[in-house]
C-alpha cells in the first residue's frame, strides 16, 4: 500500500537531524584542513624567506636602540596543538668599550601566534615564553651604561625629556609573557662593584596595548644566600605612554639578612613612574617585617611613609619616613623604638642622610639588672655606602633609669667606619645625675685576637683624664674575654681634707669568664695598680697593687674572693672577702697584714708643729658603724698608730682590739 503524505513527512523529519550532523562533520573534516592549508600558504612563504624577516628585525632593532642584534639560531613553526614560532640563539651585542661580549642573550624564545590575524598577514602573539635569558649590565669609568643608546645619550645631553612612545606601546598586545631562569650580571668599572643575580622568574598576564599589563609577578633569589623576593601587581599606562601606575604593588621577602638577623616580611605601596620627568615615586609605603637571629634575637619592624626618586639626577629626593620597632629582644635586653625623619640621598655616590630625626624608646631586661630605661633622641644620621661609613651629627640621647631615679644626657658627633672597624665620638658631653664627662673617645675592632680597643681623652668634673682600654677574646677560654684599662689623670681635687694634685695613674688587667649559671662570672687573675698623688702623704703619693680571683653572681648578688692580695706602699695584706646584697651590703672578711703604718694615711692635726704627732682622730658616727653588717677579723703583725708600735693586733667586727 503506498505511503501517505503523513508518513512521508515523518521519515523526512527523522532523516533531517542525521543529515545535519553529517554536514557538520563534513564541514569540520573539510574546514580544518582548509584552514591549515590557508595558514600554511601564508606561513610557509614567510619561513622560506626567514632571512628576509631576520634582516628587517635586525634593522629595526638597530634603528630603535642603536645596538646590533644577531639571530644565530633557527626559526621554526609548529602548527599543532597550537601555532608556535620558536627562535634560538638571539644576541644583542655590547657596545664598544665594555667587557662582556653581549648585552643580552636569549638561548630560546617561543611565540604563540593567533591564527586569525595570521590569515590576514599579521603576526600577533598570544603568549611569549623565554628561557635562560642572560643580561649583562655595565657602567664604564665615565658613568655611561651599556644599555644606553647613542640616541638616549644625545637626548639626555640636549635636555630632551624623552618618554615612551605611546604609538609603539599601543601596537604591543601580548596575552602573557613568561621568563624563566633568567640571570642578571652587573659590573661598575668605576667603583669595581660587581654581582650576579641568578634564577629570576617573571610572569605577566595580558599586555594590553597602550593600557598596561595585568598580574605582573617577579621572583628573585639573591646571590649567595637563601634570600628570595617576590613582587606582584597590575600596571596601567597613560594614553601618552609617559606615566606608568601600579595602584597596589605587593612585595614579599624571606631571609633578608641585616646585621646577623634574618627578616621575613612584606612591602605594600603605590608605584608611579613618570618617563617624561624621569621620576619614580612610592606612595603610601608600608613595610612590616619580623626578624630572628642567634642568641634568641627577636625584632619586629614597621616602616611607613613615601619615597621619591629623581632618575635623571639619580637622587633620592627628601622623603618623610617613620619607623617603629614595637618590640625587640637581644642579649638579655628588650624594649621598643619609635623614629621619624626625612630621608634623602645621592644614588650615584651612594650617600644618604636621615635628618630632622626624632624618636623615643625604652630598654629593660636581665642584662640591665632589671633596670628600666626610658629615653628620647634627636639629630641626624648619614651613610656612605661606597666607603662603608656612617655618621651621627648633633646626636642627643636623654632619659632616665627607673622613673627619674638616674637621669642622663649624651650629646656627641659620631663616625663609624666598617672598612677600618673604627668608631669615633667627638664633642662628647655626658651627664649622669651630678656627674659630667666631656671630651672624645675612639674605638677600634681587632681581629687577632678579636675584640675592641679604644682611647679616651675626656674631662670628668672638669678634671682631665686620658687613657686606653681594650676588651678581647681570651686565649685561655673561648667563652671568656680579656680586659685591660690604663688611665692617667692630672687631678686637682680637695675633699674631706685630702688634696689630690698632680699625676695619678690606674692600671687594670683581668680575665672574665662565664660561670656555671646565668648571671655568674669568674674574674680570674685580676690585677689592679694605682698611684695617687696626695700632698698629705709623707712621700707625696700612695701606691696600691691588688691581685685576686673573684666570683660574681649578679642574680644572687654575691661577690667573693678567697685569695685577695693587696700591697699598699710597703704593707702586704692577704685573705678573703665575701660581700652579699649590693643595696645593703653584708661584708665578711678574714684578712692578715704584715705591717701597717696608719700614721701615714691619717689627716694631719690642724695647727700641729713640725715633727709633732701627725695623726688626728677620725670622727665617725657610732650609729653608722653599728648599722654596718660587717663580720670578720683583721690581723696585723705590726701596727704603728699615733706614734705607738703595736704587735699582733687583732680587730674583730665587734670593735675589739687586742695586741701583744
Image: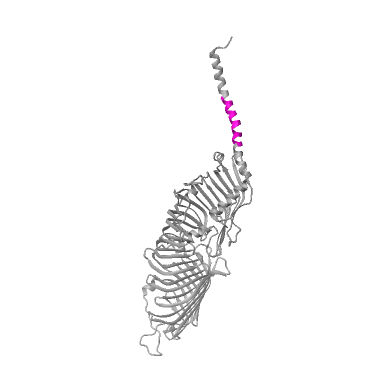
Counting labels gives 0
Residue 524 position in % (x across, y down): 54, 71
- Residue at the bottom extreme? 610
Residue 479 part of the magenta-drawn span: no
Is residue 531 visible in the rendered image? The answer is yes
- Residue at the top extreme? 1
Question: With 57 as the anchor, is 619 left or right in this view?
Answer: left
Magenta stretch: helix, strand or loop mostly:
helix
Is residue 197 visible in the rendered image? The answer is no
Along the line of sight, which residue is nearer the eye, 399 or 283? Answer: 283
Question: With 391 as the anchor, is 196 left or right in this view?
Answer: right
Question: With 259 as the anchor, is 321 left or right in this view?
Answer: left
Residue 628 position in % (x across, y down): 40, 71
| Residue at 53% over, 14% down | 6
Residue 658 position in % (x across, y down): 45, 79
Q: Quadrant of residue 343?
A: bottom left
- From what the image shows, is residue 613 above or below residue 245? below
What segment carries the magenta color? 20-37
- Residue at the left extreme? 607
Along the line of sight, which residue is nearer the eye, 95 or 548? Answer: 95
Question: With 117 as the anchor, is 602 left or right in this view?
Answer: left
| Residue at 41% over, 75% down | 460
Along the line of sight, which residue is nearer the eye, 94 or 233? Answer: 94
Residue 34 part of the magenta-drawn span: yes
- What is the quadrant of the N terminus in the image? top right
- From what the image shows, is residue 22 above or below residue 413? above
How is the protein colored in the picture? one colour
Residue 577 position in % (x across, y down): 48, 72
Amino acid at each position: 500500500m503506498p505511503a501517505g503524505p503523513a508518513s512521508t513527512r515523518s521519515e523526512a523529519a527523522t532523516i533531517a537531524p542525521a543529515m545535519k550532523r553529517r554536514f557538520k562533520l563534513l564541514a569540520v573534516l573539510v574546514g580544518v584542513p582548509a584552514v591549515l592549508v590557508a595558514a600554511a600558504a601564508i606561513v610557509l612563504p614567510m619561513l622560506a624567506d626567514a632571512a628576509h624577516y631576520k634582516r628587517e628585525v635586525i634593522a629595526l632593532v638597530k634603528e630603535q636602540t642603536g645596538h646590533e642584534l644577531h639571530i644565530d639560531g633557527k626559526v621554526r613553526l609548529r602548527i599543532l596543538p597550537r601555532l608556535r614560532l620558536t627562535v634560538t640563539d638571539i644576541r644583542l651585542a655590547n657596545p664598544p668599550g665594555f667587557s662582556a661580549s653581549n648585552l643580552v642573550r636569549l638561548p630560546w624564545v617561543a611565540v604563540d601566534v593567533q591564527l586569525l590575524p595570521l590569515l590576514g598577514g599579521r603576526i600577533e602573539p598570544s603568549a611569549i615564553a623565554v628561557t635562560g635569558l642572560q643580561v649583562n649590565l655595565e657602567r664604564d669609568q665615565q658613568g655611561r651604561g651599556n644599555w644606553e643608546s647613542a640616541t638616549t645619550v644625545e637626548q639626555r645631553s640636549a635636555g630632551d625629556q624623552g618618554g615612551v612612545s605611546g604609538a609603539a606601546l599601543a601596537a604591543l598586545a601580548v596575552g602573557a609573557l613568561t621568563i624563566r631562569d633568567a640571570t642578571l650580571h652587573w659590573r661598575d668599572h668605576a667603583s669595581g662593584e660587581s654581582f650576579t643575580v641568578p634564577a629570576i622568574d617573571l610572569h605577566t598576564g595580558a599586555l594590553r596595548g597602550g593600557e598596561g599589563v595585568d598580574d605582573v609577578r617577579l621572583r628573585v633569589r639573591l646571590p649567595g644566600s637563601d634570600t628570595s623576593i617576590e613582587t606582584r601587581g597590575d600596571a596601567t599606562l597613560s594614553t601618552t605612554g609617559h606615566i606608568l601606575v601600579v595602584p597596589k604593588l605587593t612585595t614579599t621577602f624571606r631571609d633578608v639578612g641585616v646585621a646577623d638577623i634574618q627578616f621575613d616580611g612584606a612591602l605594600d605601596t603605590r608605584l608611579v613612574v613618570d618617563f617624561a620627568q624621569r621620576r619614580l615615586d612610592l606612595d603610601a609605603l608600608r613595610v612590616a617585617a619580623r626578624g630572628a637571629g642567634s642568641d634568641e634575637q627577636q625584632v619586629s619592624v614597621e616602616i611607613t611613609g613615601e619615597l621619591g626618586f629623581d632618575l635623571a639626577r639619580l637622587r633620592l629626593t627628601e622623603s618623610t619616613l617613620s619607623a617603629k620597632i614595637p618590640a625587640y629582644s637581644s642579649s638579655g635586653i628588650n624594649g621598643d623604638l619609635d623614629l621619624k625623619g626625612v630621608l634623602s640621598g645621592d644614588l650615584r655616590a651612594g650617600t644618604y642622610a636621615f635628618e630632622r630625626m626624632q624618636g623615643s624608646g625604652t630598654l629593660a631586661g636581665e642584662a640591665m639588672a632589671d633596670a628600666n630605661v626610658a629615653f628620647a633622641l634627636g639629630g641626624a644620621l648619614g651613610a656612605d655606602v661606597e666607603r662603608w661609613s656612617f655618621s651621627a651629627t648633633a646626636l642627643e640621647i636623654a632619659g632616665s633609669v627607673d622613673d627619674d631615679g638616674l637621669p642622663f644626657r649624651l650629646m656627641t658627633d659620631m663616625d663609624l667606619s666598617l672598612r677600618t672597624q673604627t668608631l669615633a665620638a667627638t664633642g662628647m658631653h655626658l651627664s649622669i645625675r651630678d656627674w659630667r664627662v666631656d671630651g672624645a673617645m675612639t674605638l677600634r675592632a681587632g681581629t687577632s685576637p678579636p675584640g675592641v680597643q679604644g682611647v679616651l681623652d675626656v674631662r670628668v668634673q672638669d678634671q682631665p683624664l686620658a687613657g686606653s682600654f681594650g676588651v678581647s677574646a681570651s686565649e685561655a677560654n673561648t667563652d671568656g674575654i680579656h680586659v685591660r684599662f690604663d688611665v692617667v689623670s692630672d687631678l686637682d681635687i680637695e675633699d674631706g681634707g685630702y688634696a689630690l694634685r698632680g699625676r695619678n695613674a690606674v692600671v687594670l688587667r683581668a680575665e672574665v669568664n662565664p660561670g656555671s649559671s646565668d648571671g655568674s662570672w669568674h674574674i680570674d687573675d685580676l690585677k689592679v695598680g694605682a698611684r695617687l698623688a696626695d700632698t698629705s702623704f709623707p712621700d707625696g703619693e700612695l701606691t696600691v697593687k691588688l691581685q685576686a680571683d673573684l666570683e660574681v653572681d649578679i642574680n644572687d648578688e654575691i661577690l667573693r674572693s678567697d685569695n685577695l692580695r693587696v700591697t699598699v706602699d710597703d704593707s702586704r695584706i692577704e685573705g678573703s672577702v665575701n660581700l652579699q646584697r649590693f643595696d645593703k651590703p653584708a661584708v665578711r672578711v678574714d684578712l692578715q697584714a704584715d705591717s701597717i703604718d696608719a700614721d701615714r694615711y691619717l689627716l694631719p692635726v690642724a695647727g700641729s708643729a713640725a715633727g709633732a704627732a701627725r695623726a688626728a682622730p677620725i670622727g665617725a658616727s657610732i650609729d653608722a658603724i653599728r648599722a654596718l653588717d660587717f663580720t670578720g677579723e683583721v690581723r696585723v703583725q705590726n701596727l704603728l698608730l699615733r706614734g705607738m708600735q703595736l704587735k699582733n693586733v687583732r680587730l674583730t667586727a665587734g670593735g675589739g682590739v687586742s695586741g701583744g
